[in-house]
Image (spheres, grey):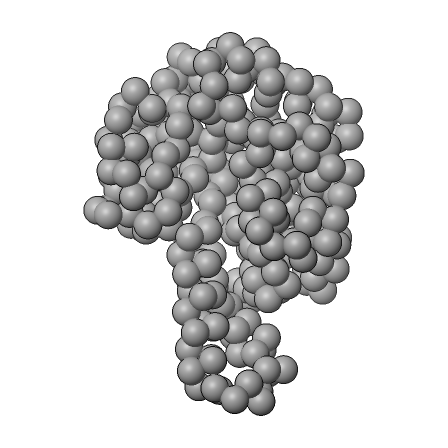
Amino acid sequence: MSLVPVKDILKMASDANTSVIAFNCIDYNMIYSVIHAAEKVNKPVLVMLYPEHAELNNTCNPETFAAAVKSVAEEVSVPVGLHLDHCQDVSYIIRAIKAGFSCVMYDGSMLPLEENIENTKLVVKIAHAFGVAVEGELGHVGVAANKSDQANLDLYTKPEVAKKYIEESGADALAVAIGSAHGVYKETPKLDIQRLSEINAAIDTPLVLHGGSGIPNDQLDMAFVNGINKFNVGTEFFHLYHETMRKYTEEHPDGAALFDYPKYAQGILMDYLVKKLELSKF
């Protein structure tokens, strides 16, 4: 199947009262594993590129990444969407749009509200001209290593502010701060489901949960039926990939089996991904 617009996949998730799972990837092995795991469980999926990762990996630019996702998506029958994760650089966002990303995230969450709205509004104007959706962020999803980021209610998304932000910016999806954080948690997070429900009631817009690695499944189930239509996973997926590399090199210290590594890695990654994708109740 050809790539499907992310906005269409988010509507599928909203209609099914669930969430599509979105995975950050950095190379072909991860891209292939995500898409073929989705085919195994017959569920839509999103593949995401984080610009900071692209800067660290010169084989991971938007054009190369988009071409790889498009190629693998054509091998399966399930909907696959291509999304640009956290980005503040409008020129980079335009580059991703030209490369074929059907949804881009402008992250102005650390800016004053009015500046965040105005910047998001500009990105929306540009993206919509190309038929591309925009995800914004309100409140701030911090760093899991800093426990205060999870507990600081001042960083959480407020329903009335979310309403103002969506009405004035025109964003198509909204990442919310309700107790999750990026990275490895020092203690089990506790999502503010009541706040999420209030945000969901205030706006008719797909909501996004960042910082997905390490959140208990029962909390995710509650989040998905209370408005979360896109759920981002990165850290635990990257850690598994790193562990797979480490284990393989230990088992093959002479490097003779280098060409067997992709199949080895893809098998392990897909076992994990199949279980993760089962969280979606499509």
- Asked if residue 86 is positioned above or below residue 28 in the image, the reply reads above
Q: Position of residue 118 (x, y in %)?
A: 59, 13
Quarter location, residue 26 = bottom right
- Asked if residue 93 is positioned above or below residue 41 in the image, the reply reads above
Quarter location, residue 170 = top right
**Quarter in which the N terminus is drawn:** bottom right
Q: Position of residue 199 (x, y in %)?
A: 39, 22
**Residue sitting at x 53%, y 78%:** 264
Q: Quick check: 156 left or right of 187? A: right
Q: How many marks?
A: 0
Q: Position of residue 275 (x, y in %)?
A: 42, 62
**Residue sitting at x 44%, y 23%:** 110
**Residue sitting at x 58%, y 89%:** 256
Q: Nearer the viewer, residue 171 or 204?
A: 171
Quarter location, residue 106 = top right
Q: Nearer the viewer, residue 176 or 143?
A: 143
